């Protein structure tokens, strides 16, 4: 009673239903065993390397199971992209059993068992642990601040049974090994907490995950608010799984999201990028972004999402980019994260570019400055990897060159290592109405044409260049003299973003 009164005074009181639910959390110790004639998992969908890992561990006297999203996908008759294994062997014991295996991670220690290019992520069953009494310190009290996070330890210093959280309840380090039923309760969603044994072809279900799969419901294990505080990224995972699987989010699982959305700010930018990449490359990127807006996770969460969802003039371009990405992912074709992020940020780059050129800067230096400004803003929240940043800059910087589509730049552009990505980007701009369709049609004919067809196109471009043009001085920088067909008008062409000089390709 006193605890409830204190929570009310601190503004942390939950609804009666939520409190009752949290107090009544059941920790099952015995799973429901689901046989093959009930779960109907197709063995042909299972990775042979994952089976090799479980067999090797079991033959060494350990328990080992395929676990998590792989089991969920197998139950939905979908071929999993990745296979994870859970075992009662410690990371060191797992590592000794395989020739190519290495222990990674500090927050959660796991073992990567490698077979060629295939990696089977193998983790040890984790225990349920109580939050330390001083985990939150006196952060909630007036006039005090949260305690400093513990120093990041080197691997040699790690206590193999270590659990640490920060002032908000986020788990910083957790390598406390436990029993399988504890490991199941530690997992996030009921549909991700099932274990499949290839040897017996049985599924162990501790939290009615089978029932939730049949009901197409996404339900958090334990108290959702507590689980989100442990790992705020779970709020993004809720959205991703709901969109990817077409599941409905359980009401109790959804309820705390809006209230706790600010906890995302405590997550390292690099980890946010990884989760964002999973979301955008899930094959359901459009649906994921729509779910993020529906759950109130876009405002102030990631500047990237605000740009994508709240600029109507770029909505068609972004929709086309994400739809094409989804189609490629579903078809099993490769997708370039650099291209995708370039598309998502293009409208912001263009807006900044236009402002700089309107202020009197030359177009190409202004474009590079705009790119740097936008990327600097994004990296405060989302640490886009340098290799993707390089791809993005090359795609953006080639756009004014490709808009010219004449004999002096076309052949050199064709030899550029990022030409194909920049060309696809240009086609998207034409399809969205940002550029005239004739520009995209010219490049399509040039790319797909043979030598003779290309010579004709280049000759036409050279003829346009040789055509006499009457020039006159203009007092302002506004307006462009070129006509829609690429020929010159009466006015001198301006040096705006859409009229870069021919020599800019070598800038």
Image (tube, helix red, strand yellow):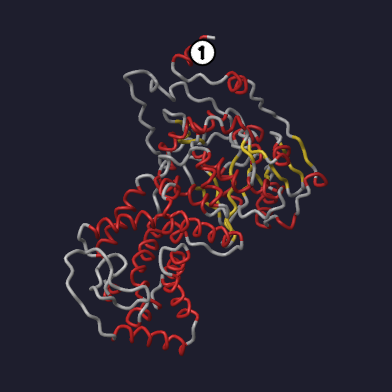
Q: Residue furthest top?
A: 2
Is residue 445 at all visible to an observer of this figure? yes
- 241 sits to left or right of 199: left
Q: Residue at x 43, y 64 (%)?
A: 429
On the image, the x and y values in percent for residue 472 come to: 18, 75
- 233 sits to left or right of 79: left
Q: Residue at x 66, y 27 (%)?
A: 27
On the image, the x and y values in percent for residue 49 come to: 65, 57
Q: Quadrant of residue 52?
A: bottom right
Pointer 1 residue: 3
The residue closer to the viewer here, 48 or 452, is: 452
Category of crowding for the residue at label 1, using alpha-carbon neighbours closer than 10 angstroms: few (below 14), some (14–19), many (at least 20): few
Q: Residue furthest front?
A: 490
Is residue 200 at all visible to an observer of this figure? no
Q: Is residue 46 above or below residue 228?
A: below
In the rendered image, the quadrant that contains the C terminus is bottom left
Q: Is residue 319 above or below residue 439?
A: above
Q: Residue furthest right?
A: 37
Q: Residue furthest bottom?
A: 452
Q: Quadrant of residue 493?
A: bottom left
On the image, the x and y values in percent for residue 458 come to: 38, 85
In the rendered image, the quadrant that contains the N terminus is top right
């Amino acid at each position: 009673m006193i605890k409830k009164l204190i929570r009310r005074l601190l503004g942390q009181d939950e609804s009666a239903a939520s409190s009752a639910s949290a107090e009544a959390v059941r920790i099952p110790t015995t799973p429901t065993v689901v046989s093959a004639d009930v779960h109907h998992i197709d063995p042909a969908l299972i990775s042979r390397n994952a089976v090799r890992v479980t067999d090797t561990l079991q033959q060494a006297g350990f328990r080992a199971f395929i676990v998590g999203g792989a089991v969920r996908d197998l139950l939905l008759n979908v071929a999993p992209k990745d296979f994870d294994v859970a075992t009662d062997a410690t990371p060191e014991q797992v590592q000794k059993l395989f020739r190519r295996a290495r222990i990674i991670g500090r927050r959660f220690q796991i073992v990567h068992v490698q077979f060629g290019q295939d990696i089977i992520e193998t983790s040890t069953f984790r225990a349920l642990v109580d939050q330390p009494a001083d985990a939150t310190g006196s952060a909630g009290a007036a006039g005090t601040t949260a305690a400093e996070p513990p120093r990041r330890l080197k691997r040699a210093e790690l206590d193999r049974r270590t659990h640490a959280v920060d002032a908000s309840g986020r788990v910083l380090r957790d390598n406390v090994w436990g029993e399988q039923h504890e490991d199941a309760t530690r997992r996030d969603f009921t549909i991700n907490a099932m274990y499949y044994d290839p040897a017996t072809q049985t599924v162990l279900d501790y939290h009615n995950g089978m029932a939730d799969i049949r009901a197409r419901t996404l339900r958090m294990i334990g108290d959702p608010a507590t689980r989100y505080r442990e790992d705020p990224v779970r709020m993004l995972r809720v959205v991703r799984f709901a969109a990817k699987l077409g599941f409905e989010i359980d009401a109790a699982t959804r309820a705390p999201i809006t209230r706790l959305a600010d906890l995302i700010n405590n997550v390292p930018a690099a980890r946010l990028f990884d989760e964002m990449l999973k979301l955008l490359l899930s094959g359901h990127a459009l649906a994921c972004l729509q779910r993020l807006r529906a759950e109130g996770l876009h405002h102030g969460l990631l500047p990237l999402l605000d740009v994508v969802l709240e600029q109507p003039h770029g909505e068609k371009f972004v929709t086309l980019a994400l739809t094409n990405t989804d189609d490629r992912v579903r078809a099993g074709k490769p997708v370039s994260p650099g291209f995708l992020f370039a598309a998502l940020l293009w409208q912001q780059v263009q807006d900044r570019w236009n402002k700089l050129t309107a202020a009197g800067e030359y177009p190409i230096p202004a474009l590079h400055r705009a790119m740097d400004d936008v990327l600097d803003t994004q990296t405060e929240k989302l640490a886009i990897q340098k290799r993707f940043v390089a791809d993005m800059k090359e795609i953006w910087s080639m756009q004014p060159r490709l808009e010219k589509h004449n004999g002096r730049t076309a052949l050199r552009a064709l030899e550029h290592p990022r030409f194909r990505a920049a060309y696809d980007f240009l086609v998207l701009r034409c399809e969205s109405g940002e550029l005239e369709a004739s520009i995209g049609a010219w490049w399509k004919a040039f790319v797909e044409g043979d030598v003779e067809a290309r010579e004709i196109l280049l000759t036409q471009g050279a003829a346009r260049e040789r055509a006499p043009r009457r020039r006159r001085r203009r007092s302002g920088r506004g307006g462009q003299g070129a006509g829609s067909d690429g020929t010159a008008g009466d006015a001198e062409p301006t040096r705006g973003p859409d009229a870069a000089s021919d020599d800019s390709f070598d800038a």
